[in-house]
Amino acid sequence: MPGRPQSTLKISALTLVVLALSLTRVSAKEDPQPKSSNTIANSASIAWNLLETDEPLLKLPEGAKTDEELNFTFPFGQFGIPLAQSLHYNAQTHRYLLMLTSDNGRRGSFVELRQVGNSRVYAPQSGPRVELIDQGGIKVLHGANGNHYSFMVSADGELRCLQIQDRSGAFIRLSYNPEGLVNGLSDNAGRTISIGYANNHVANLVQTWNVAAVKMVKSWSPSNSNSENTVHDASLERAPRFGLAKSIPNNATTPDYTSQMADCDQQLARIFGGPGAVAAANSFEPAGLSGQYPIYRGDLRGSDGLKHPGHLSFAMHLYGSEDGRGDSPLYVPAGFTTHTTTPTPTDAAVTFFYPRLGNLTNVTLAVFHVADFSIREENGRVRIGNIGGRGGSFFLYKHSHVEFYRGNTGLPASNQRQAVRINPALVFGPAYDSVRMRTVAQR
């Protein structure tokens, strides 16, 4: 589109009469006409490895030059979907436009999807056998190959493909930078991809994948394609949180996710979750989380010079998996003396008071978004239900939110919680001096 960088397509002349349509964005702003080209110049093709999950997700081209673009086009039957192109909607005619490519991604054109009767189904009058289902905030494209492509409005206001799921249930999730360029991918086999750009060209790409019990990391840059063969081992537990797929704000007060933070998050996941659970309590969300959520959700330094708390400032999220879609049982530590008997009606929150919890004394634990609430002993642990209760679950996101408060507070009013919250790392973090932490909690 005019004025917008293209990460995978070099656009030339219009080729379809249908592109004379006046398009509008979902946000009702004027949307420049999308352009189509019958050739995509200076693009280097990639190959997707969807079956061999002990190998990298992408096979990258050899000998690529810095003035070439990586062609991130995902197979769609005999066609392909260029992931940098958004799904366009014309609110006046109730029609969608989607770019599909052929000839191994080198030729592209738009397909018009028209509403079928008064239904939420959109399909072309001729051409590829595709069907788009409008599910409100999510538009799901069904292909003849059985794949499902989920489009949602991203941070730049465009309808972008945020998840691809094949007929076997395997999926790939995507994230985009503010310019609409793909900057991260992850799949349900634990493979991740982080992409960095310079002048809107791919400058580097880092892949991780599992081999036995070791996390392998491979880096690549078009200026030195031999670096594709640079492979090293990293800890299986720590590697998914490095090579971050999303940008970190320049005004973040905690710019780096360290190994100490990773250790703390892993310990919290073992305390509160089941096998495969992932905790985020040190300002950083999991790298594989849905594209609409930023990687960093901690404190920010405002233009006024003051520190502004983020959603994960002195709070913790618990997920069932790195991508935020997994299930997990939900546990709390033993030792509480009082607790609420039912979850709150809005956020399904329950509270527990501990004379001593971890390194601290006199602590209230609040757990939000508790599903199937029931306190019971399970294999020596205290289970209270499952993650993803009211307020914490939808199609691409399932979690529970955990906070710690100084004193026997019950559940404080929302505007009072910040003043009494305790950093989860102070409660359980092994790297902190326990005497200093007890002093802080008793203030």
Image: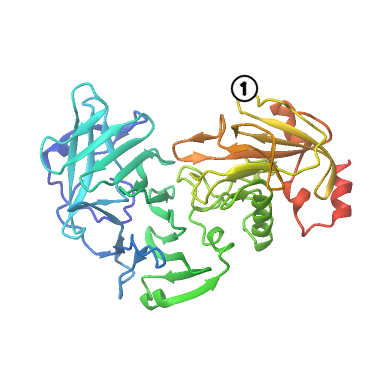
Taking depth in this image into account, of 394 and 13 the one nearest to the observer is 394
Seen at 40% across and 66% down, the residue is 56
Which residue is label 1 attached to?
Answer: 345
Viewport quadrant of the N terminus = top left
Taking depth in this image into account, of 346 and 336 the one nearest to the observer is 336
What is the basis of the colouring in this image?
rainbow
Instruction: Look at the picture and state if 390 lies above or below 282.
Output: above
Q: Is residue 391 left or right of residue 382?
A: left
Q: Amino acid at mark 1?
A: Pro
Seen at 69% across and 31% down, the residue is 350
Q: Is residue 22 visible?
A: no
Seen at 77% across and 58% down, the residue is 430
Q: Under tag 1, what secondary structure?
A: loop
**Crowd band around label 1 with a 10 angstrom C-alpha radius: few (<14), some (14–19), many (20+):** few
Q: Is residue 302 left or right of residue 326?
A: right
Give percent across and percent down for residue 356: 85, 43
Give percent across and percent down for residue 295: 54, 49
Q: Is residue 171 visible?
A: yes
Q: Give the mark count.
A: 1
Seen at 36% across and 65% down, the residue is 52
Q: Is residue 18 left or right of residue 282?
A: left
Instruction: Look at the picture and state if 415 lies above or below 100.
Output: above
Give percent across and percent down for residue 414: 69, 28
Viewport quadrant of the C terminus = top right
Give percent across and percent down for residue 234: 55, 70
Taking depth in this image into account, of 384 and 185 the one nearest to the observer is 384
